[in-house]
């Protein structure tokens, strides 16, 4: 069944109510709201392109071209700002915050969601599917709606993400499954194969495209700093974002654009991520954790996995760059999210501060030299 066209005005109406931030209320409880849209729809000049992209009567080449205009105008080029107030607080010079909350759905996952929606459109798919516990589903739902694609999202029944209503508002169908995230991925993949849907899950056939999308973060950092920083700190779950950033800097270095390669720093919840565990134990590859030992909280849920689908790629990135990986407690991530909100004006998901937490812990153990350190964050702009 064809999906109705989503006009710019409709998208704006659906996104706007979610734009309230914790900075406006001052309540720490609002730190747990998760990522959210930082914009209220497409720019007016893109209205025409959106109508073309969702119009199935148009030639596919014209629909793809129109969708590319939307992607290039609305996704990426997120803010990189020096956090001078935080520098004074923690005693490190030149900390830069790469705020992925500037993306349409408030998360870096827009980068790969829109790329894959364009790929699905170009290859003649009429539907996309993905498994999610929140942010990725919202990003895919938005990207699919702007491309005129149906979207089927698998969510573990025990998760009650606050972004479900947003996904449904964008026309996505949510399938709740009595399993964990990894099981939801398997169910989504089975549906993709059975019904010939586009499979947007990590760790699959589209990994190269996903890594390329996240590699844009590295290019944007370079564009601002004109060289690679000393280190880039990233929160990890499946490891795809971190691996993509690494591939981006690898490309820049090989082409002689940067004079050095940044250390890649990975942070995740204590004892709940295979990438961190493999690094700490010196394992050659990531090994699955015991699912029975994985317990999520409202803070760590975006980070935890008993299986990291792109974990080996992330582990390789950390080791090849001389970086490091470590744990972050719920208490520390909440503290850092509060500090970023109060001192820099960004309302970020506490889980996204895991990389920063690991960077600061290393600095406490052995002071880092004055240099440039970039921290990747996601959430809503205050």
Image (cartoon, rainbow, N blue to C red):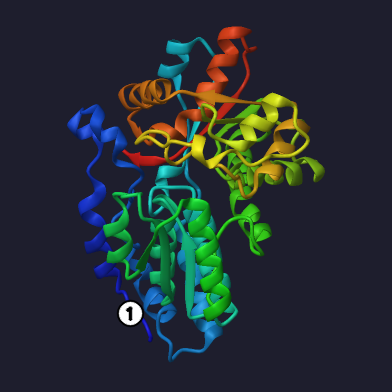
- Identify the residue at horizontal 28%, vertical 56% (top origin): 40
Decide: is 66 above or below 43. below
Q: How many marks?
A: 1
Q: Nearer the viewer, residue 233 or 49?
A: 233
Decide: is 31 above or below 357. below
Question: Residue 274: which quarter of the image?
Answer: top right
Residue 126 at least partly seen: yes
Badge 1 is on which residue? Answer: 5
Spot the residue most to the bottom.
57
| Disc 1 element | loop
- Identify the residue at horizontal 68%, vertical 33% (top origin): 227
Q: Nearer the viewer, residue 59 or 294?
A: 294
Decide: is 82 above or below 108. above
Question: Residue 382: which quarter of the image?
Answer: top left
Q: Is residue 350 left or right of residue 217?
A: left
Q: Position of residue 222 (x, y in %)?
A: 63, 39
Q: Position of residue 15 (x, y in %)?
A: 27, 57
């Amino acid at each position: 069944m064809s999906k109705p066209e989503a006009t710019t005005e409709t998208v704006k109406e659906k996104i706007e109510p979610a734009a309230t931030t914790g900075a406006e209320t001052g309540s720490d409880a609002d730190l747990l709201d998760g990522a959210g849209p930082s914009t209220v729809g497409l720019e007016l000049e893109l209205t025409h392109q959106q109508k073309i992209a969702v119009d199935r009567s148009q030639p596919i080449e014209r629909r793809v071209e129109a969708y590319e205009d939307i992607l290039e105008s609305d996704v990426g080029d997120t803010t990189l700002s020096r956090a001078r107030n935080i520098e004074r607080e923690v005693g490190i010079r030149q900390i830069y915050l790469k705020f992925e909350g500037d993306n349409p759905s408030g998360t870096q996952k827009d980068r790969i969601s829109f790329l894959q929606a364009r790929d699905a459109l170009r290859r003649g798919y009429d539907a996309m599917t993905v498994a999610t516990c929140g942010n990725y589903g919202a990003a895919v739902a938005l990207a699919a709606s702007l491309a005129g694609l149906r979207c089927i999202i698998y969510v573990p029944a025990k998760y009650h993400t606050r972004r479900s209503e947003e996904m449904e508002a964008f026309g996505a169908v949510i399938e709740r499954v009595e399993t964990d995230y990894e099981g939801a991925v398997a169910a989504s993949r089975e549906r993709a194969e059975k019904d010939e849907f586009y499979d947007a899950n990590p760790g699959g056939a589209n990994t190269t495209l996903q890594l390329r999308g996240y590699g844009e973060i590295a290019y944007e950092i370079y564009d601002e700093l004109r060289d690679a920083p000393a280190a880039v700190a990233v929160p990890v779950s499946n490891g795809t974002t971190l691996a993509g950033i690494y591939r981006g800097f690898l490309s820049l270095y090989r082409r002689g654009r940067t004079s050095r390669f940044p250390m890649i720093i990975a942070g995740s919840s204590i004892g709940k991520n295979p990438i961190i565990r493999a690094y700490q134990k010196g394992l050659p590859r990531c090994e699955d954790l015991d699912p029975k030992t994985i317990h999520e909280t409202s803070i760590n849920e975006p980070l935890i996995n008993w299986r990291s689908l792109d974990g080996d790629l992330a582990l390789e990135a950390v080791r090849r760059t001389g970086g490091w990986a470590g744990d972050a407690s719920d208490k520390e991530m909440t503290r850092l999210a509060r500090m970023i909100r109060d001192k820099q004006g960004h309302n970020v998901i506490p889980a996204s501060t895991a990389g920063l937490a690991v960077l600061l812990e290393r600095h406490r153990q052995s002071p880092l030299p004055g240099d440039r350190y970039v921290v990747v964050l996601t959430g809503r702009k205050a």
